[in-house]
Image: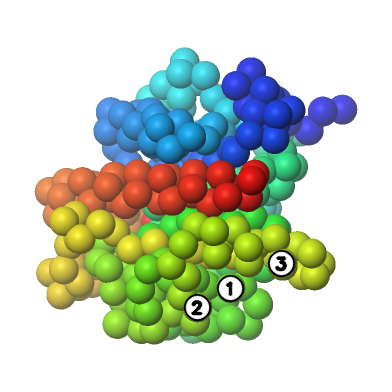
C-alpha cells in the first residue's frame, strides 16, 4: 500500500534528490479567507520555485494523502467549506474513511517525513495558548517538532499564544528554536517578541548543517527556524495587543475550544484589523518559503 501520492513534479524531484519544500494546507482552509488564500497558496509555490526548489503542498483528498497538489486541487481546497482540520490525532482516521482534510503543521510534518522531504515552510506554528493553565490547550505542533525530523521555517509563534510558555515547552521537548539573523524570538506580525531566542543562525547553510548533525546523532525530532517578518511588513506589537485581547475574550465568550480556537482567533483578528493582518501574514509566509528553499538547496548539496 502506498502511503501517499506524489504529484508528477514531486515524484521527479524525489527521484533526482532535488530540493523540495513542504507546505501545509490548514493555512489555506482555516487561516485565510477566499480568494486571498488561493492567491497566496499559488504565490508561495511560485516563490519556492523561483528560489530553485520544488513545492509540495500537503492535503488529504478523498482518502489519499497528496504530496504536491495540482492547481485544480488547490482551488478546490481554497473554496471548500467545512473542510476537516487534520492534526496527528485525526489524519490516519480521515484517510482510512476516504475523507478530505487540510493538514496542520503537525500533520504536514508527518506527511513530509513519509515523503522523505526535510524542510517545511509555514506562517506560524501552534503553541501554548494563553490561559493554558486552565484550558490545557497546547498545540500538537510542539510535540510533533519533538519527534519528527523536519526543519520547520515559521515566523515564530503568534501573539495569540503564550510565547514564553511555548518556548518553555519547546525547551522541555528538546526542540532547537533558531532565530534567523537576529537574537530575539520573532512574534509573527512583529519582528521581536521581546524574548531572546535559544539559538541564532545567520545562514541557510548553518541551519542545514545542524539538521544533518542531529540526524547523524540519531536525535529524534525537528528544528524550528523562527524567521522574522520583513521590516516593511511588520505590524507593531503594541498596536496588536488590544486586538488580540479582544479576540481572546470573544473566543471565551463564545465558548470556543479545542481545534476551533486557532481558526476562530485568526478570523477575528482579520476582522478587527480590517484585513491588515492578512497582508502581513502573506509577506511572512512568502519570506519563509524563500528561506526554506535555500535550506533545502543546502541540504541537497
Ligand atoms: N498559526 C498561524 N496560522 C495558522 C495556524 C497556526 O499563524 O494557519 C494553523 C497551522 O496549521 C497550525 C494550526 O498547525 O493552526 C495549529 O492549530 P492548533 O492550535 O489547534 O494546534
Ligand atoms: Mn489546541
Q: Which residue is mark 1?
A: 176
From what the image shows, is residue 103 above or below residue 168? above
Q: Secondary structure at mark 3?
A: helix
Q: Residue furthest right?
A: 1
| Percent position of residue 207, x then y | 55, 62
- Left-right relation of 202 to 89: left
Q: Is residue 7 visible?
A: no
Mark-to-mark CA distance, 1 and 2: 7 Å
Q: Which residue is mark 2?
A: 199
Q: Residue at x 15, y 50 (%)?
A: 276
Residue 163 location, quadrant: bottom left
- Left-right relation of 218 to 28: right
Give the number of the disc on residue 213.
Answer: 3
Mark-to-mark CA distance, 3 and 1: 12 Å
Q: Residue at x 54, y 25 (%)?
A: 69
Mark-to-mark CA distance, 2 and 3: 15 Å
N-terminal label among 1 and 2: 1
| Percent position of residue 38, x then y | 35, 29
Give the number of the disc on residue 297.
Answer: none
Amino acid at each position: 500500500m502506498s502511503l501517499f501520492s506524489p504529484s508528477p513534479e514531486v515524484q521527479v524531484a524525489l527521484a533526482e534528490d532535488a530540493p523540495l519544500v513542504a507546505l501545509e494546507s490548514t493555512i489555506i482552509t482555516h487561516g485565510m479567507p477566499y480568494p486571498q488564500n488561493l492567491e497566496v497558496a499559488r504565490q508561495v509555490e511560485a516563490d519556492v520555485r523561483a528560489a530553485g526548489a520544488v513545492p509540495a503542498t500537503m492535503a488529504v483528498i478523498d482518502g489519499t494523502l497528496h504530496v504536491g497538489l495540482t492547481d485544480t486541487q488547490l482551488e478546490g481546497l481554497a473554496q471548500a467549506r467545512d473542510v476537516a482540520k487534520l492534526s496527528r490525532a485525526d489524519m490516519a482516521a480521515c484517510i482510512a474513511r476516504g475523507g478530505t482534510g487540510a493538514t496542520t503543521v503537525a500533520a504536514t510534518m508527518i506527511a513530509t517525513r513519509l515523503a522523505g522531504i526535510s524542510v517545511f515552510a509555514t506562517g506560524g506554528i501552534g503553541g501554548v495558548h494563553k490561559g493554558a493553565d486552565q484550558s490545557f490547550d497546547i498545540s500538537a505542533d510542539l510535540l510533533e517538532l519533538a519527534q519528527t525530523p523536519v526543519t520547520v521555517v515559521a515566523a515564530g509563534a503568534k501573539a495569540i499564544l503564550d510565547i514564553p510558555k511555548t518556548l518553555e515547552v519547546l525547551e522541555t521537548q528538546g526542540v532547537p528554536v533558531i532565530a534567523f539573523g537576529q537574537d530575539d524570538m520573532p512574534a509573527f506580525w512583529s519582528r521581536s517578541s521581546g524574548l531572546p531566542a535559544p539559538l541564532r543562525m545567520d545562514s541557510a547553510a548553518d541551519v542545514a548543517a545542524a539538521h544533518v548533525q542531529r540526524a547523524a546523532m540519531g536525535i529524534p525530532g525537528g528544528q524550528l527556524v523562527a524567521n522574522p517578518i520583513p521590516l516593511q511588513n511588520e505590524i507593531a506589537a503594541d498596536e496588536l495587543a488590544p486586538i488580540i485581547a479582544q479576540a481572546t475574550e470573544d473566543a471565551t465568550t463564545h465558548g470556543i475550544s479545542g481545534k476551533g480556537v486557532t481558526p476562530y482567533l485568526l478570523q477575528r483578528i482579520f476582522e478587527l484589523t480590517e484585513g491588515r493582518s492578512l497582508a502581513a501574514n502573506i509577506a511572512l509566509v512568502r519570506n519563509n518559503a524563500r528561506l526554506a528553499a535555500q535550506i533545502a538547496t543546502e541540504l541537497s548539496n
